[in-house]
Image: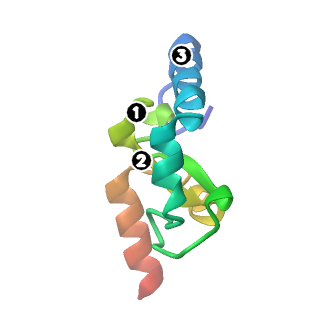
Amino acid sequence: MNQFFPAIDETFLKKERDKARKLRSSQWWKRKRSLGICHYCRHNFLPKELTMDHMIPLARGGKSEKFNLVPCCKECNTKKNQLLPTEWEEYMALIKK
């Protein structure tokens, strides 16, 4: 676990990851991903290249609910890591300068 964030209960994480796994195979997710657009960089990708991201990360108390899940490219998902949406926006603003 990251040293900067409080530890999250493993039972909570397991439950939320299971919910995300189920949603990943749902028609809802397949439709959302089929657009082929990364939520963060807005670039186009093949749908199979997009990953599922928790906008509010599980490690920061987010949940595997439809409103919190977005398709994104692997590069953005890796860079975003455990940032909250506002922290991500600040990061993007800094690198665009």
Q: Position of residue 13 (x, y in %)?
A: 55, 21
Kindly give the residue lying farthest to the bottom in the view shown.
97
Q: Residue at x 43, y 73 (%)?
A: 92
Asked if residue 79 lies left or right of residue 67, the reply is right
Q: Nearer the viewer, residue 58 or 40?
A: 40
Q: Which residue is mark 3?
A: 15
Asked if residue 93 lies left or right of residue 29, the reply is left
Q: Secondary structure at mark 1?
A: loop
Q: Which residue is mark 1?
A: 62
Say which quarter of the image contains residue 62.
Answer: top left
Q: Residue at x 41, y 78 (%)?
A: 94
Instruction: Give the Cα distance between marks 3 and 1.
Output: 12 Å
Q: Nearer the viewer, residue 57 or 6?
A: 57
| Circles 2, 1 touching at the beta carbon (< 8 Å) | yes
Does residue 92 appear in this view?
Answer: yes
Label for residue 55?
A: 2
Instruction: Give the Cα distance between marks 3 and 2.
Output: 17 Å
Q: Secondary structure at mark 2?
A: loop
Amino acid at circle 2: Met
**Residue 20 vertical placement versus 40 (above, below):** above
- Counting labels gives 3
**Residue 15 vertical placement versus 93 (above, below):** above
- Return the disc, 2 or 1, that comes first in the chain's sequence: 2
In which quadrant is the N terminus drawn? top right
- Return the disc, 3 or 2, that comes first in the chain's sequence: 3
Does residue 82 appear in this view?
Answer: no
Q: Position of residue 89 (x, y in %)?
A: 36, 66
Q: Position of residue 47 (x, y in %)?
A: 61, 60
